[in-house]
Amino acid sequence: MASEELFYATIRDIGSRLRRRAISPVELTRAHLERIEQLDPKLHAFVTVTADRALADAKAAETALGRGDISSPLLGIPLGYKDIYATRGILTTGGSALLANWIPDEDSTCVARLQRAGAVMLGKLITHEFAFGIQFPGHRYLAARNPWDLQRMPGGSSSGSGAALAAGMAFGALGSDTGGSIRGPASLCGIAGLKPTYGRCSRSGVLTLSWTLDHTGPMARTVEDCAYLLQALAGYDATDPASSREPVPDYVAPLGRGVRGLRVGVPREYFFEGIDPEVEKGFEQALATLRQLGASVEDVQIPSIQSAGAFMAIMLTEAFAYHERDLREHPELFGEMLRERLLAGGLITGSEYVQAQRLRSRLQADMNTVLRRVDVLATPTSPKPAPTFTAVYDPEYGFPRGNTGPFNMTGLPSLAVPCGFTAEGLPISIQLTGRAFDETTVLRVGHTYEQATDWHKRHPAL
Amino acid sequence: MTLEELRDRMKAARVEIAENRLEVVRRLLTDALRPIHAMDSRAHRTLEPAVTFDTGRSRGDHGQ
């Protein structure tokens, strides 16, 4: 077994070693496959390990490096893909019994772009059922566990992506985010995760949860690694009707510009309701660090922020519309909890859905107004640290309100960055949100903060 | 939302939910609909429901 240091290296570091031929992509991939074999039986992050494909990708990368190809920073880098991304010839389950045997004919655009950049596909990572329903005991697929405490959830719905990265089983992963499914697991697993602007990364070939709220994006252990992944993912895709033609800037080069002179706004209303005191303390310390680094930090008001709760009405309605036929014809193939949530979406009236979208427009306008005065908004990513499975499996647990959904409503780019640990050793995270298509500033603030702290260098004992 | 209203909605939508889960669903929908029911649509200027993502409108000095 290779050293822990290898598995927790950054994409920049490992890429440099690959290009210097200090390690070969095949060696690196074999080491990851062994680590997955060793750790995944207790973490359940992977639904499918594509060992043969991974080794074939690694051999192709080795050949490319051998002929001097150093064009892509992702060449030979082992990654995992959330199992709602279609992968040609490889089982894609969506965490659902309905798709237990689905083998797509084509790759999703995001997978195709990462593979074209030379990445090595380690396998498919478990997702909450159709990116919405937690796997309860007895479900066809086992729920992923949080590497920081196996009795706790890693968050979701990109649960396998969060767990695999925190456990050093991949260098990067694809997540998807309808109400926080990239940033939530990033927050609870102590890694970085970026929900890019709506339309920035393609949703083509990704299972739908809610058309107007669904985002795709990268997850990794550092902000810089997210930037490398975003660079390969971002850009217009004619097969996604929501895809933007906005030009793609260089996401990596500006990371080192610091935060001096940047303005950070903190909306105190809504995002601190019911917050855990340790999370609040960690967040306030992160703000102090940003001040020390030269940013100005000020409280801001988003007048219509309380209307962000309408997010759930939009998501439930759209999810019901997408799944209605299967719900009526094969209800037994849905997990009980997911079925119940989806059916709730069928009880929302057309008028209520339209009014929710009107509230959304107002929230978007208000947030854009605030973002003319400040460069980014900062909030805690999750109000509480990772919950135990025992708590979540309580039938009365419900669906707690999060801090991430408002930015799915507005489509703005939003990044989760580790900012501390609780006394029990559970990760805490800060959420940074910027202007539409200004991922560059969001990543820059996150990277600058990350470089001034060592939270991202801590890893769970496994 | 009352349980009675929830049952009426289920009937209209031809949706069945187990009796012992109705309270959880009622709470979920009550929370989701609270801001909508609190909104007086007459008090707002007309807004198109469609959300757009206009980069030119929101980008500032530090955009790139």
Image (spheres, coloured by chain):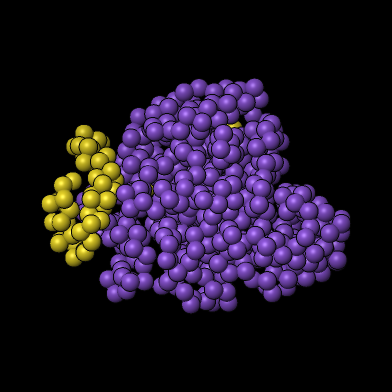
Viewer-nearest residue: A294 or B60: A294
- Residue B60 in picture, x, y percent from top left: 54, 33
State the image quarter where residue A368 is shown.
top left
Above or below, comparing residue A182 to residue A61 in the picture: above
Q: Which residue shows up at 47% across the image and 74% down it?
A: A100
Residue shown at 22% from the left, 54% from the top: B22
Residue A73 lies left or right of residue A365; in this view the side is right
- Quarter of the figure with residue A192: top right
Q: Position of residue A456 (x, y in %)?
A: 66, 41
Asked which quadrant contains residue A450, the reply is: top right
Q: Residue at x 18, y 46 (%)?
A: B1
Q: Nearer the viewer, residue A286 or A63?
A: A286
Q: Is residue B63 above or below residue A30?
A: above
Instruction: Say if A352 sits above or below A367 in the image.
Output: below
Would you say A387 lies left or right of B34 here? Answer: right
| Residue A301 visible in the displayed image | yes
Q: Position of residue B16 (x, y in %)?
A: 21, 64
Please give the letter of the chain rendered in yellow.
B
Please give left or right for residue A294 compared with residue A272 in the image: right
Q: Is residue A314 above or below residue A56?
A: above
Q: Nearer the viewer, residue A32 or A346?
A: A32
Image chain in purple: A
The quadrant of the rendering that contains the N terminus of chain A is bottom right
- Residue A294 visible within the image: no
Indicate the position of residue A388 as horizontal and vertical percent values: 47, 48
